[in-house]
Image (cartoon, rainbow, N blue to C red):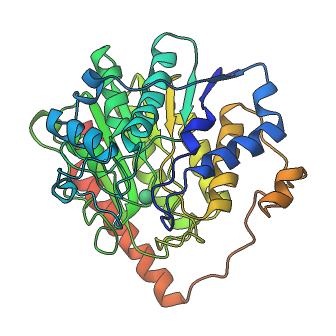
Amino acid sequence: MNRVAFIYDDILTRHVLSNDHVFVPARLRYTYELLEFLGAFGLLNSTIHPPRSALLEELLSFHTKEYVEVVRFLSENDRSIDGTKYNFSFDGDNPIYKGMFESALLTTGASIVAAEELMQGRADIAVNFSGGLHHAMPNKASGFCIFDDPVIAINSLVANGLRVAYIDVDCHHGDGVQLAFDNTDQVITISLHESGEFLFPGTGFTNEIGEGSGTGYSVNIPLHPYTDDDTYLWAFDNIVPPIIESYKPDVLVTQLGIDTHVGDPITHLRLTVQGFTAIVKRLSTLSPGRWLALGGGGYNISAVIRGWSRAFGIMLENEWPNEINNPIADRYDIHFFDDPVQDSMPENIREEIKKYAERSVAKIQELVFPIHGL
Ligand SMILES: [Zn+2]
């Protein structure tokens, strides 16, 4: 049985970016509550660990000292600093709020604690759903992300000599993580996302394959708006397993954003919770025995709670019944894990979706596969 470590403390869920911001950290608490009612934390192979704050030297493995200081000052309400230079504002994607430094330190530290559980051999899978903040850049905030916990956690794995495969299934391109490891073959990054032609951050095209010794170790699978479970899984199956089997990582790191969901208010893919579940099952078979699972985007709260609870069940090798029959069902109005069957899109759109995915897959097979002997 997999030994699964869940990194969690209610404190991770308490901050509010701004009153009308779509990124609602309380979604982590709702997920935790559902898992608790399902008995997830009473199982012998599951443990809960509190996070710790990331250390300055850990942050500096990716971020500039200047940026870290700026976040600290803004968090203390120091108005003498111009936050806009670092992509902060009072009402945009990255609002300034009191205490944001401390909460970003904890979220980042939670991913480092998860990596440590794996490195010290105490867990086979370690989960931090508060992490996965893949857009943060060395010297600026981006896309609701202050510190790039995936990069910082991966840096701790790499410092221990481990080869890492990072797979990002968030609806947005994992641009910060790609940038961090663009020049190395010690980490391979694979991102499946709604194409940058249509969605923030506007990057993640098939010709972004890395540089220098990292050439062939950045992989991007852009998809057309309205892509559904079938086409998504078809693209995944054609690219991800062969590359991972050839690369042979020591650790798998995944960013499990669920903003690919058909009900997500800020994106345009059309995956269901069943589709997300199928992705997580595939990821579990690709794990070499050490798997760091991070959260990510997801702005339809019901999809987040159901998708992540299901994912955790798969990790525990304990799948929950489809019907949710406990107080959470009424509290959050979620009665089944599965989504209803979706109406299919008009034929011309379905063809466009399929063609787009086929072009992405063919381009990767042309540019990246030969580098991996495929
Ligand atoms: Zn996202």
Front residue (pair 281, 300)? 300
Q: Report the label total.
A: 0
Front residue (pair 281, 99)? 99
Front residue (pair 330, 365)? 330
For the point 57% across and 45% down, which residue is it? 14
Residue 20 visible at all: yes
Which quadrant would the N terminus be assigned to in this image?
A: top right
Residue 206 in percent (x, y) is at 25, 59
Residue 177 in percent (x, y) is at 29, 43
Q: Residue furthest right?
A: 325
For the point 46% across and 61% down, which residue is it? 18
Drawn side of residue 28 relative to residue 116, left or right: right
For the point 41% across and 42% down, which residue is it? 99
Residue 72 in percent (x, y) is at 28, 38
Drawn side of residue 37 relative to residue 20, left or right: right
Residue 259 in percent (x, y) is at 51, 61
Front residue (pair 304, 281)? 304
Q: Residue furthest left?
A: 212
Which quadrant would the C terminus be assigned to in this image?
A: top left
Q: Is residue 301 above or below residue 62?
A: below
Q: Is residue 99 above or below residue 232?
A: above
Residue 369 visible at all: no
For the point 30% across and 37% down, which residue is it? 188
Drawn side of residue 366 relative to residue 135, left or right: left
Ligand 1 lies in which image quarter?
bottom left
